[in-house]
Amino acid sequence: MRGDFSRRTHDRRKQYSGVLNEQGRLLTDADLEEEHRILAGQHEQTAADVIGPSGGPLDGAGFEITVDTEGMVRVGVGRYYVDGILVENFPANEGDTSIPFECQPFLPTAAGDVNGPLTGVHPVVLDVWRRLVTPLDDPSLKEVALGGPETAAREQTVWQVRVLDSIPNWTCVAGAPAMPSTTGTLAAQATPEAAQKTPCLVPARAGYSGLENQFYRVEVLRSGKSRKVDDVKLTAVTVVAGATDQIDVGASEAPEAGAFIELVRSGAGAADPFDSTFTQVTAVKESRVILATPVPALAPGETLAFRPVSAIAVMSRENGSVVTGITGIDGTTVNVTDLGPDGVLGFAPRQWVEITDDAVEFDASARRRLYFVTAIDADEQTVTLAIPAKELGDKQGIDARRHPKLRRWDGVHGIWQGASPNNWLHLENGIEISFAAGDYVRDDHWSFPARTAVMDENGSGNIEWPQVGKKPASLRPDGILRHRAVLGYLTLESGSLTATDCRELFPPLTAMTNLFYVGGDGQEARRHDIGFPKLPTDLEVRVASGETPVKDALVRFTTESGAFTDVPTTAQGIAAFSWTLAAPSDAASSAPPQPQVCTAELLDHAGDPVENQLIRFTATIQDLTTLLYVSGDGQEARVGDAAFPQLPRPVVVRVANGAHPVEGATVQFAAEQGAVSATSVVTDAAGAASVTWDLERSSAASQALTATLLEADGTPSPHQTITFLARVDPASEGRGGCCTTIGDTGEFPTIEEALKELHGRGQRDICLCLLPGDHRVGSAVVEGEFHLSIRGCGRTSRIFVDVRFQFAALLSLRLADLDLRYSPRSHPGEREPGVLFVHDTADVRIDNVHVSGGHVAGPLVTIHGGRRVEVVDSVIEVFRLIPIRPLFDRLESRVTSDARGWPALGGVVESLFRVFDAVGSPEFGGRSGEFMRAIEGATPAARRRLAGAMRVWTGEPDADTDVASEVVGIADTLEADPVAIRELPERIRRLASRFDTSPDFLSGVAVLEIAPAAELRELDGPPADVTIHNNLLYGDVSLYGRPAEDTEIIDEIRTEFIQAISEGGVITGGLGTLRLSGNHLGRMRMSGEILALLRQFSNDQANGKVALYRSLLLSDNVFDGTGMKGPLHPAVAARHVALTGNHFTMAGLGQEGATPTVLEVVALAAAITGNLAEPADVPRGSADAIIDVTAARSNDAGNVDLFIV
């Protein structure tokens, strides 16, 4: 505030609560101002804490934005709070409820052309700030009875309702768009004493050298960025001989008339780039430039140049308080009310002045006008300017209603940065300032006192400026402090302007008693209950004032019939009502059930309903008990030797009344062919009824079975019938009820032999059935143009893979009900390339397959190519393994160090190693037997020596605790009698289990790799349809190939990539659709190849387009690995990406971690809805994770604890 203050001392960090004037003490203007700041700050902070950022009273809220019948915008009268500041809009006439938008008291010019052309959605905001009011602004402040002297100034709350530019898709929850603000800082100091090279020299005087105590103000007059002073071009000029205010410059380089420039001396010791003269160009005549100020004198050898000025700061040693009223403007002559009391606080030639009024001060976009004074006429009270002044009105060049003013400034400078931190701009009297890099906004300012009485040891004055160490602090501006709140928005659709209210309203504290829902809504009563059907649970509401329950408040429950019951609340504020529904008539018994309504209303002390305090409950009489499908449809029976082959699973239905099972209902089963185990079944406590179904062997077509719900009288219930279909698999004829069987008792002993034989016969349709037990596959590669199905009996059919199972170029492949395993202990020191690899096969389905392995070098399951790929109901898990051989090498070293013990123990220890090398393989059982036989043949002394060596080994620092515990148990058993030794097999199994840790979603390993058939730059490849559903994937899923080791891509390519997407230069949808739903997995990752292609767009190396999936649909998945640290950020890319209902648990996130990015999305269009982030161990506040979206178009809604950026 540009007032005549001595200084400003308020600092909230000191936590002063008041100003106390002791008797006989001096009371200054700064003391009174601080008292005001303390009280106002406490009041505003309290209001902001209670109300929030903005809000209005429920009764009496103002600033509602409406559109009247003539299409004009109006602003409602009343009160509103913004950051704790009370703002009031008073009516123009008694009884008015609003004022026209253009009639705002602090809006002399339109802040946003509200009556101009509007398009789209325009936010409407309330801007609030404070200003100083003197008698020049409000003459009523003068005391006429005392001759009209000036009294104390006033602080005024100023507000403006502004209509902003259109913002697409803007809504109330988006918040108020930010206002321009100064990002730069200012540092100030009194000139420090220069270091002297010899003690014989007396240092020059430093510090503040002014003769008066002053209150300095540095203010931004014209907005702009600070520029490095050494980077600005200097244009050489020549001083016109005989003229003091003219220079010559090249005609092409001459500045425009009215421009502000700085004259800079150079050469002959003029090395300070801040040592310049600020001036204004008054006229330009070809190459001659006429200036407002005299040209600085040049020393011999010096030359002169000028530089343009953009951002401008002004300085006042009187806090900008030297100001007078303007009574008229005529060209360069300005008539004023007075010229000041004296030469110190008045106006004089060779000063810079500003002409302003309310229109300029209230419009932040208006340009402030600065002029140079050439002459003063004290008799006529006129000020003569170097150039004509811009008129402020049409009556004598002013509009007196806007309070025109002339303000003196004591210095004007461009806002420059120094070439080094030691470059300071000299204001005057030993005061220096330094601007930092950043934006500077009009009206922002800094102020500081300069005191002659603040003496240092050298007798110099100083300024009061905060210090950091021994250096002046760089500070943000003291003001202007502007506040903003959203009021609503205007929308123009079909030529009609509408207003939407966004204000936040609150009731008085004494009217905070509210009615809350507790439970009982949406229930169902059974139609066939005797009498009037009663709901199973009471209707419950709660009455509370804030969080405090209200006892004995009356709540009225009213049914549709008009009957009501008044219920008092309990000590917990609960009112409960038992609702008996109206019984349906017989005539309406077959009609759909209609919901019935009961209303709960809060009553006041007079027994009348309180406005807006009601809750409606609905309930329905269930139409009929319903027959529901459970399982058993679509099965196949294997022929085998039975005349009536039985389906593998029973046919199951369920009878329920809404959500409640019905026990004792009768279901009739009738098979058109074959036979059922029972034709009439009564439902159990769960409402279930089931039968087994034997099919007709001779029929190859589908056979049907119907299940019908019977009424109490035994008649079929209408519309309550379910039909099941099943068929006999003719391909199983003569195969013991299966396809070609594989196993010890099957048609072929191994998979390789069966495929070699059957394919050699020219069969193009091959179906293999793996009998229960262990099966082994070496380095098999199955390829050829035929259809292949390999099925088993669940996890009882185990395939041990030596290298990896590969399928290439098949017509179709189905793997179902299998257990695929890989054990790296069979290959010490090696890392497996994966368990299953499928490529160039058109139709691939993996169903109910369990894939496991450890010591992984690549994904366990890899599928490249395929028009239709399905991975469903399967488990893929990686085990993290404790290396066994190094542990037992140290045990062997312990034993062999004693030569007497080793000969007897060599065979025992070696057989023990062989057991552990076979863990997880078919050889484990046989090798365990070998070890038992070896230990039984050892002497007691040898067993004790082995036990002792084991105990010594478990004490080593790196021994695993769990493993050591099991080893001690084996040692104890070795020393026991022969009976106890029989426990060794069980102990060995337990010890072996310690070396396989549980599968972990945080393994960081890509367990499943999916890649399209086409190259990533081929746009015409075959479209794929990929489904990954209902799987447990203990690790990550990689798209487009082998996963990259670094997926931090978005920050590198964001700007270029979004532009390329928008222009159609990147994303194409030639690869079909990928659906990932209902899975539990670690993370989503992308291949190194696709990332390399995408990165090219950030390096301007793009060539052509990248072929991606057209649609990538991620729904109802649980991601457990998204909180892991490191560069492996989860990422997906496709033409269209949709994320719906996913859960990001961030189980691997540490407490010290920053808010993690759980997924990076790259797409042409993206929709993010209904997703949830939940940290497993660390509460992190309201938003715990980020989904980073790089897309030309995107939308999000309903996400919890997620930032969508």
Image (spheres, helix red, strand yellow):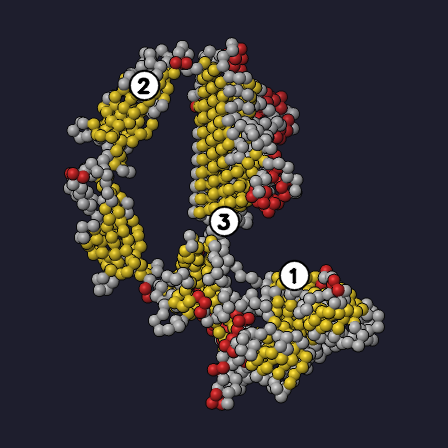
Amino acid type at mark 3: Phe
The tag earlier along the polypeptide, 3 or 1, is: 1
Q: Residue furthest right?
A: 301
Please tell me whether mark 1 sits on a helix, a strand or a loop. loop
The label shown at residue 437 is: 1
Give the x, y percent position of residue 1152: 55, 49
Residue 467, compared with residue 1113, is above or below; it is below
Residue pictured at 36% horizontal, 64% vertical: 58
Dot 3 or dot 2: first in sequence order is: 2
Residue at the disc numbered 3: 1203
Query: Is residue 423 shown to the viewer in this render?
Result: no
Q: Quadrant of residue 724?
A: top left
Check the image and name the residue furthest to the bottom: 146
Asked whether the beta carbons under mark 2 and mark 1 sit within 8 Å of each other, the answer is no
Residue 435 drawn at (x, y percent): 66, 65
Quarter of the image holding residue 242? bottom right
Q: Distance between the Cα atoms at labels 2 and 1?
A: 83 Å
The answer to which of 1141 and 990 lies nearer the viewer is: 1141
Q: Tell me if mark 2 has few (under 14), some (14-19) or many (20+) residues whose alpha carbon lies within 10 angstroms of its own.
A: some
Amino acid type at mark 2: Gln
* Residue at image coords 51%, 20%: 811
Residue 1017 screen position, x and y as percent: 60, 33
Q: Which mark is residue 703?
A: 2
Q: Amino acid at mark 1?
A: Ala
Q: Give me the C-alpha separation between circle 3 and circle 1.
A: 31 Å
